[in-house]
Image (cartoon, rainbow, N blue to C red):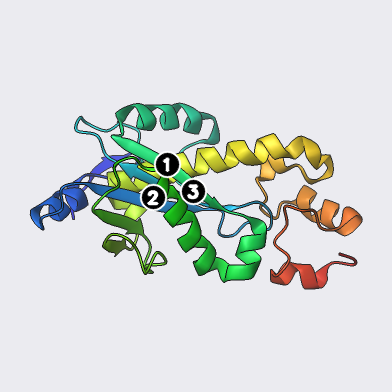
Amino acid sequence: MTSRRLDGRARPDRALEVHARREGFRRPAGADEVGRGAWAGPVSVGVVVPGDGPPPSGVRDSKLVPERERPGLRDEVVAWAAAWSVGHASPGECDDLGMNGALRLAALRALDQLVAPPDVLLLDGPVDYVHPAPVPVWPEVGGDGTSVAIAAASVVAKVVRDELMAELAPSFPAFDFDRNKGYPSPAHRRALAGVGLTSLHRRSWSYVDRLPFR
């Protein structure tokens, strides 16, 4: 798969979508997750059905986009996309279902929100965690770096989840969730040691075993 260069890195393109259409699919979509490695908050899956026009020029894996630029890029993706959505699985669902089960639930919720669902899902990563799915799923290793549809999904998922954690942060002021988004930052670790778990924490994760109290 070929791609152009952006800021010294490969820029995602539409080659995977073109290949899907050549295989007979008329409405491919990209999907990516965020929050897998967090200790608190949901795990989220974004889905983007690409629009007909050219994608925003800055679309790439959300981890490569400076945080201050992500909301604006998300707005550009939303304006360009034919459809988009983000589904979430709660911390309790992460505990009850395990990570793959929670990812599947979040992905199905994202798909259910689309008025016109895709007929194939281009998924970042080596594992089809959506199976069994309502549409065929094509896992693509490194897909958020090569497929513009998957990269766009990574952007909307990241911004929506980050905004959700920022909205929840005032209810848990010691944890600095507006900054760390539920990932294990120094402030987050200190708050866990001094305050213990909140309703946003995943209680089956191994870090819980090291807490002085729960």
Left or right of residue 88: residue 16: left
* Circles 1, 2 touching at the beta carbon (< 8 Å): yes
Viewer-proximal residue among 113 and 190: 113
Q: Can you tell which mark lies on residue 87?
A: 3
**Identity, as a three-letter code, of the amino acid under mark 1:** Ser
* Mark pair 3, 2: CA separation: 8 Å
- Kindly state the secondary structure of the residue where label 3 is placed: strand
Q: In which quarter of the image is the N terminus?
A: bottom left
* Mark pair 1, 2: CA separation: 7 Å
Viewer-proximal residue among 168 and 186: 168
The residue sitting at 30% across, 47% down in the picture is: 117
Q: Is 65 placed above or below 98 here?
A: above
Relative image position of residue 13 (x, y in whole percent) = 23, 44
Q: Quadrant of the C terminus?
A: bottom right
Q: Can you tell which mark lies on residue 111?
A: 2
Q: Earlier in the sequence, mark 1 or mark 2?
A: 1
Few, some or many C-alpha atoms within 10 Å of disc 3 (few <14, some 14-19, many ≥20)? Answer: many
Viewer-proximal residue among 41 and 183: 41
Left or right of residue 140: residue 38: right
**Identity, as a three-letter code, of the amino acid under mark 2:** Leu
- Kindly state the secondary structure of the residue where label 2 is placed: helix
Residue carrying label 1: 85
Residue 39, by quadrant, is: bottom right
- Kindly state the secondary structure of the residue where label 1 is placed: strand
